[in-house]
Image: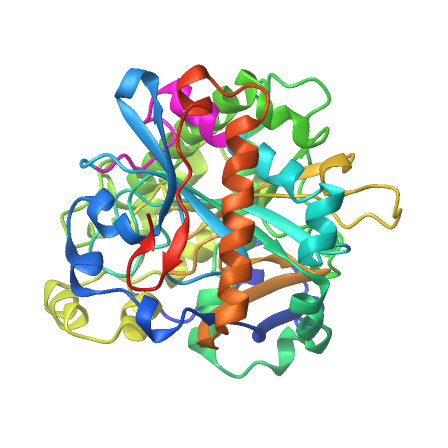
Amino acid sequence: MTEPLHPNRFAGLDPAGLEHMLVAWRQLAIPGPLPAYQLRGVELTHPDPRVRFARRIVACMPCADGRDTLALVDKASPHSLFDLMLTEVSAVAKSTPVDVAAATGRALWRTGGNFVRFCSQSRVVEDFGLAGGELHLALNCDPHTVDRESVQAAKQFHLHLLCWTPAALAPLAGAEPLARGRDARLRRQALDPISFLGARLICDALSALDLGLPGAGLLPPDDPAVIVGKRPLGCVIRLPGWSVLGGPDFEVLIRRIHVRLATLAADLLECFTGEREPPPPWQRHPLLPRREISARILAGPFTSGVRDGLECLAAALRPLAPRTAARLARASPAVRTHLMTLNHPAYALNLHAPRCRSPAHGLAEAPVVHLIIQPRLFSGIGGAGLLTLGGVPSVRILRGQGTFSLAQWQQRARFQRAFACFNRDAPGADAVTAALPIRRFVDFERGWV
């Protein structure tokens, strides 16, 4: 447990400045499916994702000589009218970029790049009203949190493919300064206490990493730019456009980033608790005495600003007693996520092109793409539900707000199948993928067949 943590304490920010940051945590409401397409019992509980997703699988792609399988899935709880999930669907969960074969990772990122290209096709833009819209590719990683609510609820390695029309983003005009928020629990979930400090920690951890992509570069932290919306919140790697997703070096980079983050997480856990492995479910390792934590922080490879932030964190964290953990196991999700940490490494990874003022650039032609890495300590909101969007630094996607109409859902299905066909026929697809059948959405009872 902890006392309430104020994220700007960790980054040396001016509290008054942070309070001016625009947020949209209540504005962007996305409907859900009609009642007949809501999840059934077996779709909620079956251990095999191929059974859980059976009604919603648009297409499957065997990878790595059949060791892995990627599936394009019609999401049960959309983040946008025009979205899909690309997920590994082996019976045994593979949660991280290093748990799947390199060929699987390459297929996943190549498909993400194809989604950007698809959403830039003139006919697609016209048919679905995408002109002036925005796009995100979002991946969550939280393999070790299996007790409280996690940023990676489905532990399969998966990527969210998300596109919003300008009409869908119109409510973001109602974004408000952070200072107007009065909900402490929402604030902790939407602006995790280590948001700024964690970005600095990750930036330091990646500073000596060879990115392996010509034209890519790690951007130094710039908190004032984040606050005014000129930089996304998190550690940012500048990429020279979307085309890098189609090459093998990008998969290698993501894999190496994960290894660095996992090592950083173990180092920090050892610094605070003396342990390097995650604790058993419904437990958290006891904290070391404060003096010993401070000594370990001082001896660690941390810059002075990060060291000060870690000291603030050490001063605020409180141990989680077994009796309290047992009580939280029976408590509401809101209470658990407010008081109980995630197990590291827990992070969200997003790909997003900064808004370009030149109308000459379509989505796929963006000259700069940001690879954004956001750490999580308390927040149970993943990278597909909490992101920089529409020029607003922090936007929360409110899902399941009412229902889409039948016509909208049919339009969604048409978009999804058109993308599946585009991805199958795109350059770079192997012979197996190119021969795969694409399913059709029949009705809500049978789904995709």
* Residue 299 occupies quadrant: top left
Q: Residue at x 24, y 43 (%)?
A: 50
Asked if residue 434 shows in the view, the reply is yes
Q: Residue at x 30, y 50 (%)?
A: 154
Residue 193 point in image, percent of width and height: 47, 60
Residue 42 as seen in the image, left or right of residue 290: left
Q: Foreground: 167 or 94?
A: 167
Number of numbered discs on residues: 0
* Residue 112 occupies quadrant: top right
Q: Please say whether residue 97 is one of the residues in the magenta stretch.
A: yes
Residue 359 point in image, percent of width and height: 88, 48
Region rendered in magenta: 93-109
Q: Is residue 144 above or below residue 215?
A: below
Q: Foreground: 148 or 102?
A: 102
Q: Foreground: 209 or 102?
A: 102
Residue 245 point in image, percent of width and height: 59, 27
Residue 300 point in image, percent of width and height: 43, 33
Q: Residue at x 43, y 26 (%)?
A: 105
Q: Foreground: 158 or 31?
A: 31
The quarter of the rendered structure image containing the N terminus is: bottom left
Q: Please say whether residue 84 is one of the residues in the magenta stretch.
A: no
Q: Is residue 199 above or below residue 166?
A: above
Asked if residue 377 shows in the view, the reply is no
